[in-house]
Amino acid sequence: MDADPAKAGSGADRKSTLLFETTGKEKVYRFSDSILVSLPQGRKTLTTSWLNGGYREDIRAVFNHMIPKGKHAPKELEGGSVPAYLRIIAERIGADPDTSSGLITAANMDNVAIVTKSFRGVEVTAIMTAGIEVNGGRAGDPASYYQEDGSSQFIQGTINMILVIGADLPEYAMAKAIITASEAKTAALQQLMAPSRYSYGIATGSGTDMIAVACDGTSSLFLTDAGQHSKLGELIGNAVIECTQKALELQSDLTAFSQRDMLVRLERFGISEADYWKVASGLNGANRKAAFLKVLREMSKNPVLVGATATVLHIVDEISWGLIPETAGRKVAVSVMKGLPAMLGMDDFLPFDELTDEKDLIVDNWVRVTAWMAKNCDHKGLCSQLPQE
């Protein structure tokens, strides 16, 4: 029988709300600390869970659970390990631990996002929670720990995905669906320029992401390709991209709008307001920190300046990827900086010979130039000439 939230443990924190139902009768419930997807008979699943993970044909429920705050290692969980803890949670939310699979995260379940895409009777539903502000990383970044003898540690920030496909797929196509969904998640992060917290790169996910794919083994629709060229792959890609971005907005307030800020873009390179003031205090002009930071924050949201920032930082990225020789990249970046007055409609003179040096790092040059602009904003009416929109 299906997982029944009505049979969950007692208490207000165990009450459930039906959030969504697919055309295939998969039901999505929200508890205070979990999202449960109840699966009708005949579903096939492929999950990265510690509990009944891998490929199975007997799973009746997949859930996404928020672990309690302050837990830093599996041994601190109730039950003393992740598998034991997931079994306990399954029972509490009315699911059979032997036919359930669970994902864990630190994300709030109130911030779940659900997106469905369909075409000619094929329906794909993505159910996601996403946090990236702490744990965002890029594949190949330095490791946080070396796992030995099954030991691990919890690091906050996870993108968890449950993907429900309203068609029958063979095992290999389900594995392909995971690849396509993972690529879509990464595409969503790249579109938002989400930063890695472990390098200067753009995040491709978090180090703790989990996924579960469920398909309908009873369906008359039999699809053998979930790659990018297939219509199923297109549905997966579009559903996951949209769902990832919705979940990140709900959990982390990460949106296209929030990224329209020079200071936000520079965070990826470790540049803060404190770094700006350190540079600015050594430049000509009155050292009034509060006034400087006020202008810097306003200036950093100027869309033209954000566009120029993106251009310069992309040059930095392409140098790191080996696509542009470093000397040529630095020369072009300085040229972009010298064009800032014209781009911003400024008539005032900027002492570029003092502020820029093609031998210096591009980001260092950029901070000096924009720090001078913020510090000397009131010089000859420069502030009033900065467009605000």
Image (tube, helix red, strand yellow):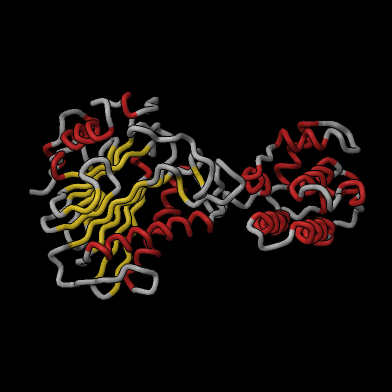
Residue at image coords 86%, 49%: 356
Closer to the camera, 138 or 287? 138
Say left or right for 262 vs 58: right
Is residue 145 shown above or below 180?
above
* Nearer the observer, 88 or 17: 88
Q: Residue furthest front?
A: 149
For the residue pair 277 and 78, the one nearer the viewer reads as 78
Pinpoint residue 361: horizontal percent, then vertical percent.
77, 48
Horizontal relation, residue 179 to residue 35: left or right: right
Residue at the (23%, 56%) spot, across then down: 214
Between 158 and 150, the one nearer to me in the picture? 150
Left or right of 143 in this view: 281 = right
Q: How many numbered marks does the figure carry?
A: 0
> Which residue is found at the position 68% from the left and 37% from the top?
272
Quarter of the figure that contains the C terminus: bottom right
Residue 109 drawn at (x, y percent) = 33, 40
Residue 281 quadrant: top right
Residue 184 against residue 91 in the figure, above or below: below
Q: Is residue 366 visible?
A: yes
- Whether residue 29 appears in this view of the structure is no
* Position of 337 relative to 12 (above/below): below
Q: Position of residue 96 (x, y in %)?
A: 13, 40
Which residue is drawn at the image coordinates 83% and 50% (left, top)?
A: 359
User: In the figure, is residue 14 to the left or right of 315?
Assistant: left
The spot of residue 317 in percent (x, y) is 65, 55
